[in-house]
């Protein structure tokens, strides 16, 4: 889907016109993927626009930077203010935020001490995999590409270079006519989607792959686990083999962009009834209910943008 660019972006401490936020072609990140980022959503609520779990996302951004020894020139508070400012300046309500920190111009050795640049973009964004996918689900496939092995690339960091793996998985799936790809870990067991975490439902219990399965410990994943347990739904983190995808009563993907997307088939094999199941529907109701006011915000997750 084509992106409609907004007018304003926050870059290096100030709001600029979108076209003026530029980076040199010899920046370290462009050559080596040395960047960390977050994807964050704001939603329309009864009290106006609110950013969902902003502080948790920004803390993870700083954790990712720490793993890669990337010095952050701004504080969490400053970047929080930047997120609010860029939404307000672009007059956005339901939007997607992208804070990004990267090694800039300063040398091209792998260990070069380059300065860190930071930008925060925000733009209007609808449903990532299509509005109809939230109800009807998507067809997925298990990718021929595996996720990285332990102690190679840290899956727990949300780093730009990690998403080369996701690109291979997603592009292969699209080329083969599927809505999204699912990757196995180096163990041959289930990992996650190209850019989403996985949940499988058996007999009303939600199962999800553990952080040791080369996954990003998603904030949406964490949200759903907390909401499910509070609602009396059992959640289990465990390793699972590929064939469980074919045997589950329901399967869904989740993430900031994908939100909660049911999977109706995997590798051409129908999942359950071939449409959104009751547990998936309940999790959607709990999740989206946070934003329409029908579900109480349990952790102060909604941060009003304000005037």
Image: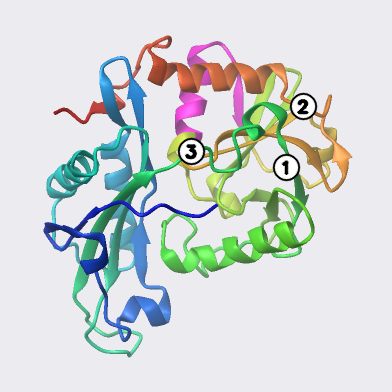
Residue 295 vs 130, above or below: the answer is: above
Left or right of residue 126, residue 303 in this image = left
Is the Cβ of the residue at disc 2 closer than 8 Å to that at disc 1?
no
- Residue 252 visible: yes
Alpha-carbon span between mark 2 and mark 3 = 21 Å
Residue 157 belongs to the span the image colors magenta = no
Residue that carries the numbered disc 2 in the rendered image: 275
Residue that carries the numbered disc 3 in the rendered image: 126
Q: Secondary structure at mark 3?
A: loop
Magenta-highlighted residues: 221-236
Quarter of image, res 204: top right
Closer mark to the observer between disc 2 and disc 1: 2
Q: Which quadrant of the figure contains the C terminus? A: top left
Closer mark to the observer between disc 2 and disc 3: 3
Residue 85 location, x and y as percent?
Answer: 16, 43
Residue 306 location, x and y as percent?
Answer: 16, 28
Alpha-carbon span between mark 1 and mark 3 = 32 Å
Quarter of image, res 65: bottom left
Residue 110 vs 66, above or below: the answer is: below
User: Is 263 or 228 nearer to us in this picture?
Assistant: 263
Q: Earlier in the sequence, mark 2 or mark 3?
A: 3
- Residue at the image position 66 percent from the left and 63 percent from the top: 171
Q: Residues within 10 Å of mark 2 (few under 14, many from 20)?
A: many
- Residue at the image position 35 percent from the left and 61 percent from the top: 36
Alpha-carbon span between mark 2 and mark 1 = 22 Å
Q: Residues within 10 Å of mark 1 (few under 14, many from 20)?
A: some
């Amino acid at each position: 889907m084509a992106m409609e660019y907004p007018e304003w972006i926050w870059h290096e401490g100030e709001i600029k016109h979108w076209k003026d936020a530029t980076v040199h072609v010899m920046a370290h990140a462009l050559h080596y993927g040395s960047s960390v980022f977050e994807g964050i959503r704001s939603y329309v609520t009864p009290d106006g626009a609110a950013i969902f779990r902003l502080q948790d996302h920004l803390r993870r951004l700083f954790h990712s930077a720490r793993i890669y020894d990337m010095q952050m020139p701004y504080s969490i508070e400053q970047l929080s203010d930047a997120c609010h400012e860029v939404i307000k300046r672009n007059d956005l309500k339901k939007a997607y935020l992208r804070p990004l920190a990267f090694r800039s111009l300063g040398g091209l050795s792998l260990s070069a001490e380059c300065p860190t640049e930071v930008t925060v973009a925000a733009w209007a964004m609808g449903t990532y995999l299509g509005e109809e996918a939230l109800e009807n689900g998507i067809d997925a496939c298990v990718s021929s590409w595996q996720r990285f092995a332990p102690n190679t690339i840290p899956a727990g960091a949300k780093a730009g270079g990690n998403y080369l793996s996701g690109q291979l998985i997603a592009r292969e799936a699209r080329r083969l006519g599927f809505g999204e790809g699912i990757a196995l870990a180096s163990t041959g067991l289930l990992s996650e989607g190209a850019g989403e975490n996985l949940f499988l439902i058996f007999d009303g219990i939600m199962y999800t792959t553990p952080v040791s399965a080369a996954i990003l410990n998603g904030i949406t994943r964490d949200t759903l686990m907390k909401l499910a347990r509070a609602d009396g739904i059992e959640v289990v983190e465990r390793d699972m083999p590929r064939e469980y995808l074919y045997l589950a009563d329901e399967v869904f993907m989740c993430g900031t962009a994908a939100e909660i997307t049911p999977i109706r088939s995997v590798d051409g094999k129908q999942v359950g009834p071939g449409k959104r199941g009751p547990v998936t529907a309940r999790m959607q109701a709990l999740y989206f209910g946070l934003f329409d006011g029908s579900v109480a915000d349990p952790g102060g997750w909604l941060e009003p943008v304000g005037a």
